[in-house]
Image (spheres, helix red, strand yellow):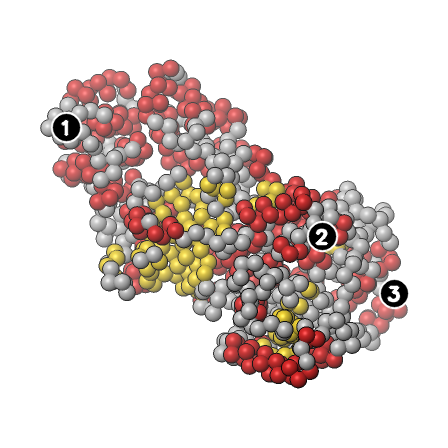
Amino acid sequence: MKTDTGYSSELSQSSNSFIKESLDLPGTKTITSELNESTAISLPKIKKIEAFAVRDEILKEVKSGQYKIKIAPSDLIDFGGQRSYDMTHQLFIQHGGTFVVMFDGSRDFHEPLKEYPTGDITNESIVKHWVNSILTYCVDDNDVMPMILFAATHSDHLSYDMQKKMKKVFVKKVTEMFGTHEMKKHIVFDSIFFINGTDKNDQEIQNLKNKVVSIAMNQPSWGLRRPMIWVPLELLIANMKKENIDFILKTHLAEANTMNGDLSLSDKQLDDFLLTQHALGKIMYFNQPKLNTFIVIYPPALVNILKSFITDEMFWPKDETLRNILGNMTNTGRIKKCDLLKLWQQKHIDQWLACDEFKEFVIQVLVHLDVLVEPRRHFGLNNADMNIFLVPCTVKNEIPMSFLDDKSFENKTIALVYRLLKRTIPSSLAFKLIGAVSGIWPIKEENGRPLLYHSAAVLYVDSKTEFRIIVEDTRVVVYLTHMPSKFTISPDIAASIQECLTFTLTDVLKFYLTSIGKSHTNKDVSTLFQIEVGEVCDRSPCVISISEAIRSSSWTCCNRNQHLTKYPLLWIFDKTQKKCPPDCTGLHVDALSMLPSDKHLVRLACQLDIDSCKELVFQLGLQETHCKNVNHTYGNDALTLNTMMLYTWMNTKIIGKSTTKSIFDLHAGLKAIGADTHVLCKVFREYTDFSECPNIGPEEVPNDDIINNLPQNLGNCALQLGVELGVTINSIEQTKTDYRKMYDQTTDILRKWKNSTEEKPTVFKLLVGLERVHLGGFQFVKDMYLRK
């Protein structure tokens, strides 16, 4: 169990039963435009706001500076021993909190706990897990808070003499575990409380309470002065807590604020007050759209809501339907919104969720915090899956590492490692990182099951590209795999994944630094980790620092294998460059040996003028008769002529040459005519700028309005666009035969693409193809979705 006493000065236990209600205001004046909208929200009726307002005599004392707060209330948060709160406990960690980490004192520290059937959970692993989780985001400053205490339970199972002996053993064990921890100043080593939870008069429990109060009174924030005009609202919130009110509309609190006369806050001051109270752990308030409607007056109430689905199996409800929902979520990492709402209909949960609007607010908060993740949709999902959430923190299955046994995996993969400069990475960070990344790339699926695991996931880039992210110990390992070969990995894709992962990791670390209630606006979180690049060697990532990779063309690893740095450096490729850098050695032999695809041919055709392309195909053995036939059939469109000349070469048996064509043939031909062979490098470039994509549904299938109206916003690009979308040149040729008008050709090709079963046609893929052809349409599609 982990208990947080918040930013407070005295420990007081709060009731375990609350009645979820909020305020009903009759026609009173407002100070914000949002108040009128709030009347549509179906909140239960209770006392008027005046019932919680500060009395006039107290306001007078506050104004005169004579009012003194005699009791410093605090919140007690009980996680009930559940490791399932790995993800969510960060919501409740505050820098002024005191944490009591508890374990069963009647058992050996290394004895597997029977409550966890996996057999790998012990007192030692639980204590180490929570201490590292709490201290991960503490910064090296003079503040001794937060503080961690240890309490052993079940003292009644042992004799008095054995209790005294075991307390010494516990102190020694905890000192061995954390005595050299870089944040050991936050840990109390000299005393471990051995309590009897069955005795309400147990002296050790009283000693523990006294210690918590002593820590609170000696922390730097004790007695800290605060703005006088905050006091009325602090008292009003305290009055609401006494009445077991756990949340309130912001507009209602704003109305209450106007009752304080000269001590009323302006709108900006009210926001500053709420954000400060949030930072101190007294309330929860997110000043962002969709999240700033409600204020959570009593944050521990969220734990009770979370227990409905983020909970260990031993605490599951008896109802078979609900158990099946939780079992499926644990196995797949997914939960339907309707199933989540079913769990919330349980009587002991529903009392904290008084209205549908508040349920939606809680869902949005959990999405914001990546407890729930709205997955990007890809091939295999349909519109009915839009209301499915990923829940990374509930997945128990470990990622199978058998992929490392496949020797070909090394030849298809480059590796990226983020090494955090801490002892361990708490699983809460892993869950949030994976959750955030899966909001950028969809989780890959096999047999209808998402490949989401405990602290790991496989993510889908395209039909030939995927990457694995695995969080272990002090590092985040990323494997980027391209099915044909690692030598044909698009540098743009590799760089985009690295940039997104680095940004996400930085953002996650910033989130936690701010969520513990301290200001770290000037903290450079990039100093908290280092990035290494490399390959796969002997079933593990073989990596070196980026600076080393840049300085050398190769390195020899501990397995005495030599690795080239060229391909690991794709992780930091400069996507803005149009031409190859001076030190580019061209395509690897694996890429050169590939059979040119339709896409390769079109992309090469785009980079050649007609004369150069004719010279190239002649060099490759095509006869002039062939070129004349192509010219007669396709007229004067340069791109179409170039593409069809290359396509004709691909499908023509050249006398005296192999029937198997390769990109090496194109390379040799370009070299023979004195052309730049680096144009072939650009054939493997990909468009990966996510910033221009609309935020609404970039992975959804474009609707018929898009397909029908897009051709009028495009030029003559049926061939190039079709190939970029994956339609074969043969199929495009059939379209050109069936339809003579340009718009009709484009419309038919778009329909063929949309009806394809090879790979799901998405808005993002359409935008990528439009960006490639540079003939308009990109802005049209973007605007269509932004208007929704």
Q: CA distance from mark 1 to mark 3?
A: 96 Å
Image spot of residue 469 (x, y percent): 44, 53
Q: CA distance from mark 3 to mark 2?
A: 25 Å
Q: CA distance from mark 2 to mark 1?
A: 73 Å
Q: Name the residue tied to disc 1.
A: 621
Figure label count: 3
Which class describes the residues within 10 Å of circle 2: few (<14), some (14-19), or many (20+)?
A: many
Q: Amino acid at mark 2?
A: Phe
Q: Looking at this view, is 242 or 683 the one in front?
A: 242
Helix, strand or loop under label 2: strand
Q: Looking at this view, is 662 or 508 the one in front?
A: 662
Q: Looking at this view, is 154 or 463 the one in front?
A: 154
Image spot of residue 509 (x, y percent): 52, 61
Q: Looking at this view, is 17 or 584 the one in front?
A: 17
- Residue shown at the point (72%, 58%) measured from the top left: 301
448 to 745, vertically: above or below: below
Disc 2 and disc 1 in contact, CB within 8 angstroms: no
Q: Earlier in the sequence, mark 2 or mark 1?
A: 2
Q: Name the residue tied to disc 3.
A: 55
Image spot of residue 618 (x, y percent): 15, 28
Q: Amino acid at mark 3?
A: Arg
- Residue shown at the point (36%, 55%) measured from the top left: 415
Left or right: 186, with 268 as reference point: left
Q: Name the residue tied to disc 2.
A: 294
Left or right: 671, with 505 as reference point: left
Left or right: 168, with 252 as reference point: left
